[in-house]
Image (cartoon, rainbow, N blue to C red):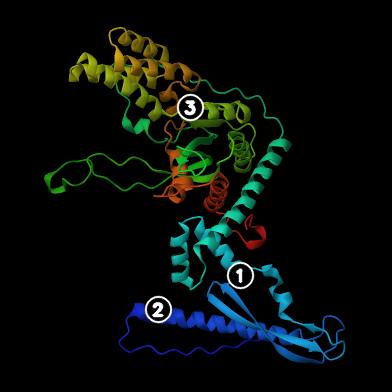
Amino acid sequence: MYVQVSLKMEIAATASLSQMEYHIQEAGQQAMREALKTTVRHWEDLHGACPFCGHQQSRLEGTTRRKIATTFGQVRVHRRRFRCLACQRRWCPATALFAALKGATISQPLQDAAIQIGSSLPYRAACQQLRKLSGAQISPEEMRLLANAYGKQRAQSQQQEAERLCATAEPASEVPAESAPEAEAEPGVEPAPEAIIGPKAGAQATPPLLVGIDGGWIGSREQRGGMEGKVTVVCGKVEDLPMAPCDTTFSWSKRTSPRRPPRPRHRLAQRRYVATFGPSKQIGQQAEAAARLVSQDRTRPVVVLADGAAWIKTEQAKHFPQATCILDWAHLWREVRRALRATARAISWSAKEQRYHKNVYQNWLWYGEVDKAVQGLRKLSEGVSDEPLRALQKAITYLENQRPWMGSYEDWRKKGYPVGSGMIERAVEIVINRRMKKRGMRWCRANATAIVALRADLLNDDWITPQPLRAFP
C-alpha cells in the first residue's frame, strides 16, 4: 500500500527561526492527519470483499464519522459502509481496523505517551506539554484514568513477579554477617565531614549489594496526616564520577574559588527501584526480588542501610537475614546532638565545653562505643530536669533500640560501605516527591500505588526497551 500526501505551506519572508519551526510543525501535523485518513481509505479499498459471503460486488451506503486522538492531533475518519449485492448484508470494512481500540478514542501510541508523561508531571501540565510538543489533544481526566488503569495493572504484575521470585528462590547460604571490629576511640579527634556523608570506594574485591529502604509521606484523601509510601533501591555497582580540578591555594585574585577540594560524587550504575503504598510485606518481597534481578550471586555480601524504623527491621530480618545492617549516621547523630544542645542550654555550657562534649560523643558513636555514649548520657541526665531530661531519655532509648544496627562506622567506611542515607533519600525524592508531593495534591492509596509503579518502571529504564520486550504497557 503506497500513500502519498503533498505538503504546502506559506511562511513570511521576515519570519524568525522559531516562527518557521512553529509553522512547519503545524503543517506537518496537518499532513500526518491527512495521511492517516488516506491510509484508512486505501485500507478499506483493499478489504472490500464481503466478510459474510466473500462477494466482491457491493454498493456504498454512506459513511460513519469516527474521532480518534493521535500523537499528531485529533483525526476525523469517515468510515464507509457497504452493502453486498449478493447476500444483501451490510458491513463496514474499517470496523476490523478500529477493533484494537476496544471502543476508545485514543490511539495506543498516544496512550503510551500520555501514561509516560503523566507519571512524570501533574496531569494538567502533562496535557499542556503533550499538546504543545505533538499537537495531541487529551484531557487531564482521560490522562488520569489511563495512568491509574495501567499503573494498577503494573503494580499487580510487579507484586506477582516478586512473590513468584521469592517463592521459587533457593534458600540463601549461611554466610555470617561481617561484624565490625571496634576501634579505639581517639579523644579529641572528630570524624571528617567527608567520611560521614557519602560512600567511599573500598579495596574490597567483591563489592557488596547495597539495599536502601525508607519511606516518604504524601497528602492523603483517606486518612489524616497523610500516608507513607515505601521505597527501596538496590544497587549492585557504584561508579565514581570525574571530579573537576580544584586549586586549594587561597589568594585574593581567586577568592571566589573553593578552598577545599569538592567531595567525590558517585553514580549508581546497576540499580533498581521498587515502591508501593501497600503493606510493608509487599516492599519486602519486591526488594528481595529486585536484589535477585540485580545480582545472581547468592554468596555476595549484602548491606542494608536505613533509618531504623520498626517495619524496616521486620522486613530485613525476613528477606535479608544475613545482611550487614547499618543505621544512617545522620539520623543517629541528629538524635544525640539534639539532646546535647538541650543539656547545654540548661547547664549553660561554654563554647569550649560544647565543643568538647560534641567531639567526645561523636567519636564514641563513630567508632562503635555505644555503651560509653549511653553511660555518658545517663550521667548528664542526673543533674537536669524537664525538657533536657526528656531529650536525654529519648536519646538513650533511641540508642538502646537501635543498638543491633550500630557499629564502628570507621570500619564500615574502610570497607567501602555507605554510612549515610543519601542513596535512599535520593530514591524517595525521585520516585515519590517529585511527582506526588506538590502543593494541593491529595492521593488515594490505590492511585498512589499505581503512579509509583509507573515511576519505578520509568526510572528502571523500562520505557526505552523495544515494545515486544517492554513490561509495560
Instruction: Name the residue type under label 2.
Output: Glu
Place residue 315 in its image quadrant. Answer: top right
Q: Is residue 397 visible?
A: yes
Mark sitting earlier along the chain (3/1): 1
Residue 21's tag is 2
Instruction: Name the residue type under label 3.
Output: Gly
Q: Is residue 1 visible?
A: no
Q: Which residue is more in the foreground, 213 or 393? A: 393
Q: Position of residue 272 (x, y in %)?
A: 55, 45
- Mark 3, Cα crowd under 10 Å, few <14 / some 14-19 / many 20+, is many
Q: Which residue is more in the foreground, 100 or 8? A: 100
**Marks 3 and 2, how far apart in space?**
54 Å
Q: Position of residue 105 (x, y in %)?
A: 61, 70
User: Which residue is under mark 1?
Assistant: 107
Apparent side of residue 100 relative to residue 454 in the rendered image (left or right): right
Place residue 249 in its image quadrant. Answer: top left
User: Which residue is under mark 3?
Assistant: 308
Q: Residue at x 60, y 35 (%)?
A: 284
- Mark 2, Cα crowd under 10 Å, few <14 / some 14-19 / many 20+, is few
Residues at discs 3 and 1 in contact (Cβ within 8 Å) = no
Mark sitting earlier along the chain (2/1): 2
